[in-house]
Image (cartoon, rainbow, N blue to C red):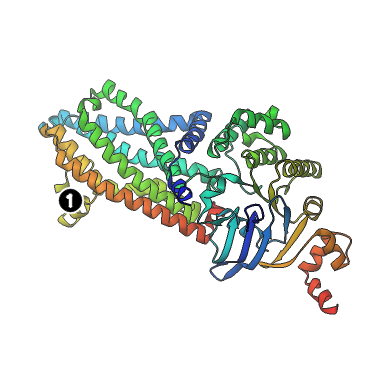
Amino acid sequence: MIAHSTRAITLAPHRVAAMVLRYLYLLRSSWTRLVELVYWPAVQLFVWGFLQLYIAQNSGFFARTSGVFIAAVLMWDVLFRGQLGFSVSFLEEMWSRNLSNLMISPLRPIEFVSALMVMSIIRLAIGMVPVTFLAIAFFGFNVYGLGLALAAFFVNLILTSWAVGIVVSGVLLRNGMGAESLAWTLMFVLMPLTCIYYPVSVLPDYLQVVAWALPPTYVFEGMRALLMEHVFRADLMVEAFALNIVYFAAAVVAFLELLKSSRRAGTLLQAGE
Amino acid sequence: MSAAAEPAIAVDQLVKVYKTARAVDGISFALPQGSIIGLLGGNGAGKTTTIAMIMGLITPTSGAVKVLGAQMPRQRYHVLHKMNFESPYVDMPHRLTVRQNLKVFGRLYAVEDLAGRIATLAEELDLTEFLDRQVGKLSAGQKTRVALAKALVNSPEVLLLDEPTASLDPDTADWVRARLERFRRERGATVLLASHNMAEVERLCERVIIMKRGRIEDDDTPARLLVRYGRETLEEVFLDVARGRGNAREAAQ
């Protein structure tokens, strides 16, 4: 019985790999899905890149903020596309009415979530790596020049994106496709609060409290400190990481509770509208 | 009770209530290992909910389900690798080819020699020429065969089928039944078949459980049901139960 219990909570890499394979087959079968991954990040880059060029040419202050807008838009895309990469892979199961097949297979929820996290990174890489090269080619901004700070920014942003993706997936499981719009819109609630394009000090005091409760705020503040003052704020990254651990753990608990609730409500069986 | 004598599926006083609707209302039955049992009932009888509770997909409101000795859904991961399920109401990813789908599910079930297993299933289910075609481009009959291949990929000890031949033409449906019969015979698997196709149940099942409004109305072999209800076919028995004539007949006797 002890062996059985242990087996029930073990994460089996072969099942995670099977799910990743399933999503890679899907991506390979559809060039439109691949193009879409690059399309929006590229559009965002050009809009913000040219805007930055324009204001830098017309303002002494903004001239020394070279790259801040482009870095911000790239970081925002890590946050938003990371969550979307997670949620869209999950939605693929609902769109194809395949969820029941997975739920009666030996695939554990933690393995399913792990596969979705891997896919989030793969989809992000497909979409963002070409765009970072476009940033170098068109605006002379090399995000890889941020070095280790980039890794700290990335880890913190992707953890937040997964936490949001996990909660959205749980809500979808429980409420069906009626909640689909959450997958596309929930992250935008964070957009004004995480201060992507402006410092936290711009916000009214009561909103600053909310902003500092969100890990991406620390990343965007840290990014501005690095690009404008050439200081790497490790303290901000550590605080963001600590918050992320709390949010990620809470998201996993929420997902498992929503899954349990779906089993009680019978929504796994329909898993549709 | 020895492991060999333990029922493959044991359902005890199972109840499922959705808000105010009692979808399943205190049913009990046991399926011996290696048996093939039909779950008959009209729309809304509670067949699909019962099967979903057996698979651990739905948590019962009360009562218990055991599959191969494991309590469902709490201990589902002890036995899910020995089970499988097929229903025309659950799709497989349409953009993946038949082979890709079987590879993914084969890996989820940790099937050994997966390439060999896929080749065997393709041959047995007449899928070889479609293996590299996307599932979404297949006909309804071909899709059913693919779904069946997925359900058999892990050679399950317990196979649950929810109207496996719904929407198929009689010839294809008959073909599917023959394959199911063969699998059950060769594997010694336990099969629970929910259906409202009486001919199918009569042909495949050694015992029939008839459900109505979440309850078990009758539970016996097809032959004994025919004698008891004084009918020629299971369809007539089903109609008697559906229209409440069974109780009247018993009362008269």
Q: Nearer the viewer, residue B155 or B50?
A: B155
Check disc 1 and report the residue beneath it: A203
Q: Could you classify mark 1 by the number of other residues whose Cα lies within 10 Å: few (under 14), some (14-19), or many (20 or more)?
A: some
As shown in the figure, which amino acid type bears the numbered disc 1? Leu
Which residue occupies the extreme top position in the image?
A137
- Asked if residue B16 lies left or right of residue A247, the reply is right
Residue A194 seen in this snapshot: no
The quarter of the picture where residue A79 lies is top left
At a point 68% along the width and 57% down the height, the residue shown is: B31
Find residue B25 and report its horizontal and vertical position in percent: 63, 69
- Asked if residue A107 lies left or right of residue B223, the reply is left
At a point 67% along the width and 35% down the height, the residue shown is: B138
Disc 1: host chain: A
Q: Nearer the viewer, residue B30 or B179?
A: B30
The number of numbered discs placed on residues in the rendered structure image is 1
Find residue A115 and report its horizontal and vertical position in percent: 43, 39
Image quadrant holding the N terminus of chain B, namely bottom right
- Asked if residue A155 lies left or right of residue B114, the reply is left
Q: Is disc 1 placed on a helix, strand or loop?
A: loop
At a point 78% along the width and 42% down the height, the residue shown is: B178
Residue B10 seen in this snapshot: yes
Find residue B232 and report its horizontal and vertical position in percent: 89, 61
Image quadrant holding the C terminus of chain B, namely bottom right
Which residue occupies the extreme front position in the image?
B2
Find residue B212 and report its horizontal and vertical position in percent: 70, 66
The quarter of the picture where residue A197 lies is top left
